[in-house]
């Protein structure tokens, strides 16, 4: 069993307070976005034997390479630790993004390798050859944009937006007002509400065309002037924000990205507000953006992100379009099943991982489910994990790696306060 030393990544969207509050420490004053607890070469956690916590950390990916069979067990079939665990703290919206299928990732990675594009190049799309299905469990109230709304609902928002622009800008002949009205007509066509194949195809086409026009780097939205005009008009019409949560969300996002067309893309997407303990799972092709909050995140071991706004980073619209599923689907909640005695099981439809949540003292004395290796993370209170003769005590934000060959790991609380442990292993 190994203690994991996870570095905090200081992406600009990170919260300055959420991780510090979780860990009970003084904030650094800088953004603290993610703690990576895994073996992805982009930022492998340092591993230290629990029997020698002062030892020099060894990168977890290097440790696994020494004895893959013992460390990974049945997970060795993936050729790597198949999942990456994170604590994610969003103080402002992340980029609008989607992730490729494994076939798309392999093809894209091979093409960029063949082209000689360095892995660190800012215009590189594929950092590895893996897909990135993921799930997130809210640890605080958590807001996300997740998947496309129905074209009809999005069309209603653009109709309201066109009215607001007409009343509060330069009339219905202005560029943004005319564009909003055109999008409303395209998205709100009666046929898009039907269920047969032809109408579904029309709905896909409408979503894709509006999405593409908004993000066109040579289009009218690219300069930011139209985005600012939209935000100013909506701010001047508070009733519109009260009546339409998506317009209110767009205005909030614009506080951080005032010139970014992603502000308008958000109108196409479902806003989802999670209470602590609720979860989402995000398959390939799902367009999403986390907006605010602290979450426990698990994904397949990949860093492949195709971005579509709300970011200063590289945006490749054609490549993004090739991976996005332009469909209005139900919000992909991931509801846990109760296994009794303070144990909840989150089982998203992915091969790489499942997540257990153990709440102590109810779960005191229970063994962690272990199918292959385990990464366990404390998010509240104090948790002791015993594995054979080895033992580790974790505070919030601390984690361990348990090899597939290790003895069963059993959890205990300190008997004084409630505690929570998340445990990740193969399904």
Image: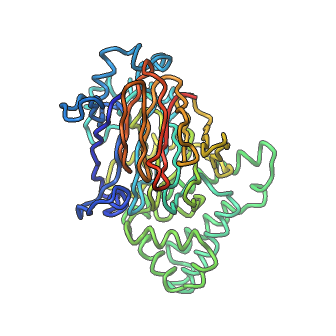
Residue at position x 23%, y 30% in the image: 52
Q: Is residue 377 left or right of residue 33?
A: right
Residue 249 vs 275, above or below: the answer is below
Q: Nearer the viewer, residue 40 or 62?
A: 62
Q: Nearer the viewer, residue 421 or 250?
A: 421
| Quadrant for the C terminus in the image | top right
Q: Is residue 185 left or right of residue 22?
A: right
Residue 277 vs 1, above or below: the answer is below
- Give the farthest residue toward the front: 415
Q: Is residue 327 left or right of residue 69?
A: right
Q: Position of residue 304 (x, y in %)?
A: 41, 37
Q: Position of residue 311 (x, y in %)?
A: 36, 56
Q: Position of residue 72 (x, y in %)?
A: 43, 20
Residue at position x 52%, y 69% in the image: 249
Asked if residue 178 can be seen in this view, the reply is: yes
Which quarter of the picture shows residue 115? top left
Residue 229 vs 322, above or below: the answer is below
State the scheme by which the image is colored.
Answer: rainbow
């Amino acid at each position: 069993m190994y203690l994991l030393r996870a570095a905090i990544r200081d992406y600009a969207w990170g919260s300055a307070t959420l991780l510090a509050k979780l860990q009970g420490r003084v904030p650094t004053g800088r953004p603290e976005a993610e703690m990576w607890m895994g073996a992805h070469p982009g930022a492998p956690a340092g591993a230290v034997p629990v029997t020698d916590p002062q030892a020099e950390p060894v990168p977890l990916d290097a440790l696994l390479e020494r004895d893959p069979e013992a460390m990974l067990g049945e997970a060795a079939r993936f050729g790597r630790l198949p999942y990456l665990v994170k604590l994610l703290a969003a103080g402002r919206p992340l980029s609008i993004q989607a992730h490729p299928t494994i076939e798309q990732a392999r093809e894209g990675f091979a093409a960029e390798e063949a082209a000689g594009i360095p892995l660190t190049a800012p215009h590189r799309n594929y950092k590895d050859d893996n897909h990135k299905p993921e799930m997130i469990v809210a640890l605080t109230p958590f807001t996300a944009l997740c998947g496309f709304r129905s074209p009809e609902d999005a069309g209603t928002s653009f109709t309201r937006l066109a009215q607001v622009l007409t009343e509060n800008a330069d009339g219905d002949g202005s560029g943004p007002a005319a564009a909003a009205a055109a999008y409303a007509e395209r998205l709100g066509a009666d046929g898009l509400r039907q269920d047969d194949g032809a109408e579904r195809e029309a709905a896909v086409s409408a979503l894709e065309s509006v999405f593409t026009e908004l993000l066109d780097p040579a289009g009218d939205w690219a300069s930011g002037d139209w985005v600012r005009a939209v935000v100013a008009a909506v701010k001047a019409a508070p009733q519109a924000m009260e009546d339409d949560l998506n317009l209110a969300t767009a205005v909030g996002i614009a506080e951080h990205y005032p010139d970014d067309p992603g502000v308008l893309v958000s109108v196409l997407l479902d806003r989802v507000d999670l209470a602590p303990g609720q979860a989402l799972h995000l398959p390939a092709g799902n367009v999403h953006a986390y907006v605010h909050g602290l979450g426990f995140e698990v994904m397949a071991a990949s860093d492949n992100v195709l971005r579509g706004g709300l970011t200063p980073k590289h945006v490749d619209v054609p490549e993004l379009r090739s991976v996005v599923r332009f469909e209005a689907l139900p919000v992909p909640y991931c509801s846990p099943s109760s296994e009794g005695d303070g144990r909840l099981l989150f089982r998203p439809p992915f091969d790489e991982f499942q997540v257990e949540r153990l709440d102590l003292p109810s779960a005191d004395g229970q063994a962690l489910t272990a199918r292959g290796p385990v990464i366990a993370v404390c998010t509240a209170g104090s948790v002791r994990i015993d594995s054979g003769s080895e033992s580790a005590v974790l505070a919030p934000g601390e984690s361990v790696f348990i090899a597939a060959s290790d003895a069963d790991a059993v959890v205990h609380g300190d008997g004084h306060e409630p505690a929570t442990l998340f445990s990740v292993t193969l399904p």
